[in-house]
Amino acid sequence: MMTAKKATGPRKERAMPDEPLILIVEDEPAQREVLAYNIRAQGFAVDTAGAGDEALARIREAAPDIVVLDWMLPHLSGLEVCRQLKSAAATRAIPVIMLSARSEEVDKVRGLETGADDYMIKPYSVAELVARIRTQLRRTRPAAIEGRLEFDDIAMDRTEHRVFRAGHEITLGPTEYRLLAVFMERPGRVWSREALLDRVWGRDVYVDSRTVDVHIGRLRRALRAPGGDDPIRTVRAAGYALG
């Protein structure tokens, strides 16, 4: 059973939980809203923070796929936020795109040496920022921006929202479809129930972890319908994996 979470202030806007989540860290409200509007318009989920410590709290609550990080922030600079992210095992793989009015080469080098994956000098084109976001996603979550996913004899057409196995179309419910998309983005990765709850259901609802088992069972039955083996592996005391 699901129950809505209570509002706790500004939160991410995520139409579908498996959308790439972009965290915008910018202390200027007008600029923050412009970025959020334009990035959301490109089909990404967006979360925002106006300060460095707030950004770190947001990331602890729900790790984004990319952090767009302003250098000049109150209390805790973007440089320090980046340093902390890249020094922690749980967050070092999250791409960071640093935004800064500092145009000197020494400043760009400093930002990159701190761990930033990209560096943009203000003023910048929002279209170019979106292009750089896509570039980072192609490296870390390529399947999230590609129209077709394939694993063995399973194919998912994300453009037409259709799934096939060995050439036979499979009918999936919305939740089973999102589960399969998560598995197919990273075949072989073991997903815990908690990680699947976050990725598939999102953090805006409470769902019993046993609900994951129910939907995994439905997904397995659907994938076996054409006569193939069960492609989903149960890893005892850890979770589930595809392949």
Image (tube, grey):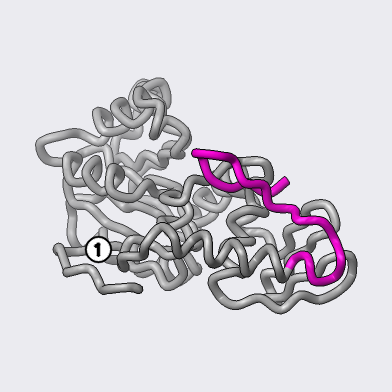
Instruction: Identify which residue is drawn at 68% across, 46% down.
Output: 187
Taking the magenta stretch, the answer to whether it contains residue 14 is: no
- Residue type at tag 1: Arg
Instruction: Identify which residue is drawn at 79% across, 60% down.
Output: 154
Which quadrant is the N terminus positioned in?
bottom left
Give neighbour class at mark 1: few <14, some 14-19, many 20+ (Cα, 10 Å): few
Picture quadrant of residue 79: top left
Horizontal relation, residue 215 to residue 83: left or right: right
* Residue 148 spot, x, y in % from top left: 74, 63
Query: From the viewer's perspective, is residue 80 above or below residue 63?
Result: above
Which residue corresponds to mark 1?
11
Q: Between 146 and 198, which is closer to the camera in this rendering?
A: 198
Taking the magenta stretch, the answer to whether it contains residue 230 is: yes
Specify the farthest residue to the right: 167
* Residue 52 spot, x, y in % from top left: 19, 40
Instruction: Identify which residue is drawn at 25% across, 48% down.
Output: 58
Query: From the viewer's perspective, is residue 87 above or below residue 7?
Result: above
Q: Secondary structure at mark 1?
A: loop
Horizontal relation, residue 157 to residue 108: left or right: right
Magenta stretch bounds: 223-243
Instruction: Identify which residue is drawn at 78% across, 63% down.
Output: 155
Query: From the viewer's perspective, is residue 231 above or below residue 74?
Result: below
Which quadrant is the C terminus positioned in?
top right
* Residue 194 spot, x, y in % from top left: 41, 50
Query: From the viewer's perspective, is residue 184 above or below residue 175?
Result: above
How many marks the image carries: the answer is 1
Picture quadrant of residue 103: top left
Horizontal relation, residue 149 to residue 34: left or right: right
Specify the farthest residue to the left: 75
